Image (spheres, rainbow, N blue to C red):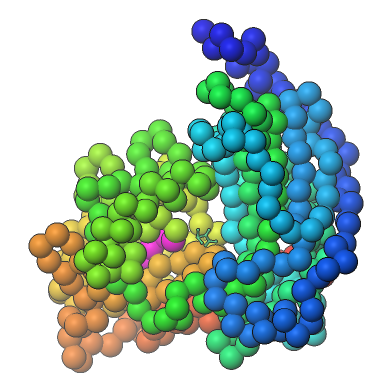
Amino acid sequence: MTQTTDRRTADQHQQGLHAHPHPALAFSITERDDRLGDLEREIVLSDPGFGKTFTDHMVRATWTLGAGWHDAEVTAYGPLLLDPAAAVLHYAQEIFEGMKAYRHADGSVWTFRPEANAARFNRSARRLALPELPESDFIESLRALVSTDVDWVPEPGPSGEKSLYLRPFMFASEVFLGVRPAAEVTYCVIASPAAAYFSGGAKPISLWVSTDFARAGDGGTGAAKCGGNYASSLAGQMEGAQHGCDQAVFLDSSTHDYIEELGGMNLFLVYRDGRLVTPELNGSILEGVTRSSILELAKDLGLQPEERRIPIAEWKDAARSGELAEVFACGTAAVITPVGELKWDGGSVDHRSYGPADSEPAMGVPESVALRLREMLLDIQYGRVEDSRGWLTQLA
Ligand code: COI
């Protein structure tokens, strides 16, 4: 039975979600005449932090069940006028992406593997019963915003990692309290100048093993990039903070034995023998674009990438035996961040304290895999080396 408040059947909605192949969206651009002044913008760009300030404009488009995608525009950045009954505020039908625009030495601006983000956005959309947005429209929306606000893309700076963080998102804007997929949806892109995600830069972070709280479960939304997953990670993160940790690591929800991810980042373990191990995609882990890029780049370093189930006990044992050389977290916002201590209810371990004094990494393996991979990624993203894999797309 579909609900009585709405005569649409699930089938009709399903057809509606995919029924409107449209010509490429044309993003009309209405430039505001009160842009932030050059001097004020340069002050923001000199020390942007993360996610605190936003550019002059934003992208907005609307989807309705009857008409598909329409009214695509670049307009002044500003608050959204939402009815208190907008479905997203009640049932969290929302998805997002995280990407960056990088300024190259010649002034041009590029983004990294946007097709992968567009594909993931559509996988998330399907999971949350939202309409898909064609890849070309997704990329065009980024181009329209970044070319309008191109002065907001910082130079990489002394840290070498300043960029313009791009946040595409889509949510149920229909005014309706029945629980069913919304018949009106809004797509937006906002942009925020960004430096390092963690205030300590590439300084190692500490992790709390969350056993009371899982981030996602079998058949749930763990593989989708939806706000709800991030909300559900916050209690674990708070528990970690109470134990003096920077982030929480979540385990599988059924056995609590296997490592999944941090909520906002994927995890990698580096063994002294050259194995680079990360939890396999099991439906509840986010398929990170940085994660998959690292698995590719690892081969160039002579590492042996492995995607498999990793018991949390393996991490503790390998740290104590000295087999584990490094652990790092990765994501678009944080790039690659080394992990130092792992703490749990009743103990802690830090792989950096256990390596035998005379241990050498395997032949050809760099001393810090995390820092070398980070440099390789940033070199590609900022155009300092040839983009031999075709991972960059020019935005401006
Ligand atoms: C990203 O790395 O871009 C993320 O989406 C993680 C976080 C900032 C939510």
| Residue nearer the viewer, 217 or 175 | 175
Residue 377 painted magenta = no
**Quarter-wise, where is residue 157 in the image?**
bottom right
Picture coordinates of residue 167 (x, y %)?
Answer: 63, 57
- The structure residue drawn at horizontal position 59% and vertical position 49%, both measured from the top left corner, is 96
Picture coordinates of residue 91 (x, y %)?
Answer: 51, 33
- Name above or below for residue 367 compared with residue 297: below
Magenta segment boundaries in residue numbering = 265-269
Which quadrant is home to the C terminus?
bottom right
| Residue nearer the viewer, 26 or 301 | 26
| Residue nearer the viewer, 201 or 15 | 201
Picture coordinates of residue 85 (x, y %)?
Answer: 59, 31
Picture coordinates of residue 221 (x, y %)?
Answer: 45, 39
In the image, is 225 to the left or to the right of 337? right
- The structure residue drawn at horizontal position 79% and vertical position 58%, both measured from the top left corner, is 76
In the rendered image, is residue 306 in sight? no
- Name above or below for residue 259 compared with residue 193: above
Q: Main secondary structure of the magenta part?
A: strand
Tell how many labels.
Answer: 0
In the image, is 312 to the left or to the right of 95? left
In the image, is 297 to the left or to the right of 19? left
- Name above or below for residue 378 compared with residue 11: below
- The structure residue drawn at horizontal position 42% and vertical position 48%, both measured from the top left corner, is 231
Residue 268 painted magenta = yes
| Residue nearer the viewer, 76 or 18 | 76
Pick out the residue farthest to the left: 346
In the image, is 261 to the left or to the right of 344? right
In the rendered image, is residue 167 in sight? yes
- The structure residue drawn at horizontal position 38% and vertical position 71%, both measured from the top left corner, is 328
**Quarter-wise, where is residue 19 in the image?**
top right
